[in-house]
Image: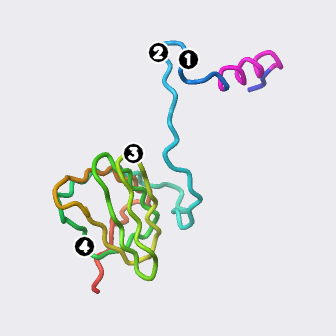
């Protein structure tokens, strides 16, 4: 597709308009996280999984690893991830993190009173398990 200078300047003008000045009916995405990752699958086809999870106060995942990066977006509450030989990470509602591949970890709800709700995005080779349970 070729753009004439007029079309290109119209597109540039549309993209630079502040969100509050947009015409009704046009939604603008909000970038939550941008991160360079390594270890994505290289197969001709990949499986995309979107999962949800709810953690009651104190709930945690099994000790595990993932074969490919996993993105976690927190809808409610907070989520803490403890990674082997790395600092812990905590993300709160409206924030996201990428769990690295091939690192032992456990995630949990650090609150004593609030639920944690997350959306999980995982791209893998077809038939790859979501996680591999590990022993401490």
Which badge, 1 or 4, comes first in the chain's sequence?
1
Q: Where is residue 53 in the image (x, y as percent from the top left)?
A: 24, 54
Camera-nearest residue between 19 and 98: 19
Which badge, 3 or 4, comes first in the chain's sequence?
4
Q: Which label number is shown at residue 22?
A: 1
Residue 10 location, quadrant = top right
Q: How far apart are marks 3 and 4 (CA)?
A: 24 Å
Find numbered disc 3 in the image and state the secondary structure of the residue it sits on.
loop
Find numbered disc 2 in the image and state the secondary structure of the residue it sits on.
loop
Q: Which of marks 2 and 3 is in front?
A: 3
Mark 3 surroundings within 10 Å by alpha-carbon count, few (fewer than 14), some (14 through 19), many (20 or more): few
Q: Position of residue 100 (x, y in %)?
A: 47, 68
**Left or right of 54: which side holds 66?**
right
Q: Nearer the viewer, mark 1 or mark 4?
A: 1
Name the residue located 44 percent from the left edge and 60 percent from the top edge. 124
Queried whether the magenta region covers residue 6, the answer comes back as yes
Q: Which label number is shown at residue 62?
A: 4
Q: In this view, does 54 lie above or below 62?
A: above
Q: Where is residue 42 in the image (x, y as percent from the top left)?
A: 55, 62
Find numbered disc 1 in the image and state the secondary structure of the residue it sits on.
loop
Q: Distance between the residues labelled 1 and 4?
A: 46 Å
Q: Quadrant of the C terminus?
A: bottom left
Q: Distance between the residues labelled 1 and 2?
A: 8 Å
Camera-nearest residue between 45 and 54: 54
Q: Nearer the viewer, mark 3 or mark 4?
A: 3
- Pointer 2: what residue? 25
């Amino acid at each position: 597709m070729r753009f004439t200078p007029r079309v290109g300047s119209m597109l540039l003008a549309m993209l630079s308009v502040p969100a509050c000045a947009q015409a009704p009916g046009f939604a603008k995405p909000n970038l939550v996280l941008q991160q360079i990752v390594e270890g994505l699958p290289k197969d001709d086809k990949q499986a995309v999984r979107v999962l949800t999870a709810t953690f009651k106060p104190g709930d945690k995942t099994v000790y595990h690893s993932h074969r490919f990066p996993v993105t976690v977006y927190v809808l409610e509450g907070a989520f803490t991830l403890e990674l082997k030989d790395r600092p812990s990470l905590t993300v709160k509602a409206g924030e996201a993190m990428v769990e690295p591949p091939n690192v032992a970890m456990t995630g949990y709800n650090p609150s004593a009173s609030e639920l944690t709700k997350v959306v999980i995005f995982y791209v893998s080779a077809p038939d790859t398990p979501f996680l591999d349970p590990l022993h401490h």
